[in-house]
Image (cartoon, helix red, strand yellow):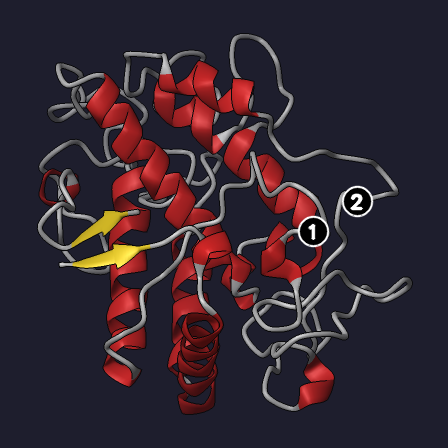
Amino acid sequence: MYSRKNQRDLTRTEKKRLVDAILELKRSGRYDEFVRMHVEFYVSDGDSRPRPAHMTPSFFPWHRRYLLEFEKALRSVDPRVSIPYWDWTRDNTPGASLWRGDLLGGNGRPGDRQVMTGPFAYRQGNWRISAGVTDEPFLRRDFGRPSAPVTLPRPAEVDRALKDPLYDAEPWNSVSTRGFRNRIEGWGIRGSREIANHNRVHRWIGGSMAGAASPDDPVFWLHHAFIDLLWTRWQKAHPRSRYLPAGALAADDPEQDRVFPYDRPMPPWDVPPSQLMDHSRLYRYV
């Protein structure tokens, strides 16, 4: 059992250990394998392939296993390291502690949006983007997207999602109009196509975080640790609510082969959502 801490509570030593472990994974090539995995399984609901990671009920369990695999890799470098979480409803400005030079570095510079500060700045020589969808070799950020401004989600938006007792609903994709999953994943709900919560955080950071290769920016892991924590909070708030769909969809349902019911194994680990409902024997949030 180990703990995942709020990033604002990390000590100077804990920050350095985390950064050093991430950089070691990058040097070894293992980090880029995680980026490529996310690109491979980021399947849109307009695609006919199975989609375990996004626009789907298995959004939460798939990313829980993905974070666990990354955390396992980090802890193979330094067993004292775990993934911290970033509560973007509280630490919601470019001046928040995670953007300082001792952790993630700050915003990208005007023009090419290249990050110039912190351990993941290209000019430091340790962070070359090679698995991304653009040709630039450097990490990019565009906080708030000034060209089309976007804000980070407010606490009320998260609270609204946490109050929904339904996990997910037909048609089990980006246009589901009910359910906790799409309220948090944030593709737009109840007739509104405005992005929310998870998606809006990706857009607020922008740059490398704006596409399928978003793990190119190490903030990805802190963001998704908070998403995982929100799922934990929802489970505690609604102990009688269950993962849906519980069983296989009807043969004539267009989503029948595309989404992952409770016991259908998810790639690439061949593990079903049912095995990822409870993390309490592995880690806790503090």
Mark 1 element type: loop
Evaluate if marks 2 and 1 touch, with contact meaning CB atoms under 8 Å apart: yes
- Residue 281 horizontal/vertical position (percent): 8, 50
Q: Is residue 100 above or below residue 229?
A: below
- Residue 3 horizontal/vertical position (percent): 25, 56
Distance Cα–Cα, label 2 vs label 1: 7 Å
- Residue 133 horizontal/vertical position (percent): 62, 65
Q: Is residue 265 above or below residue 20?
A: above
Q: Is residue 147 above or below residue 71?
A: above
Q: Residue at x 60, y 26 (%)?
A: 154
Tell me the tag on residue 145. Answer: 2
User: Residue beneath label 1, please?
Assistant: 206
Residue 244 visible at all: no
Q: Residue at x 54, y 31 (%)?
A: 197
Q: Is residue 168 left or right of residue 158?
A: left
Q: Is residue 216 above or below residue 32?
A: above
The answer to which of 25 and 259 lies nearer the viewer is 25
The answer to which of 54 and 224 lies nearer the viewer is 224
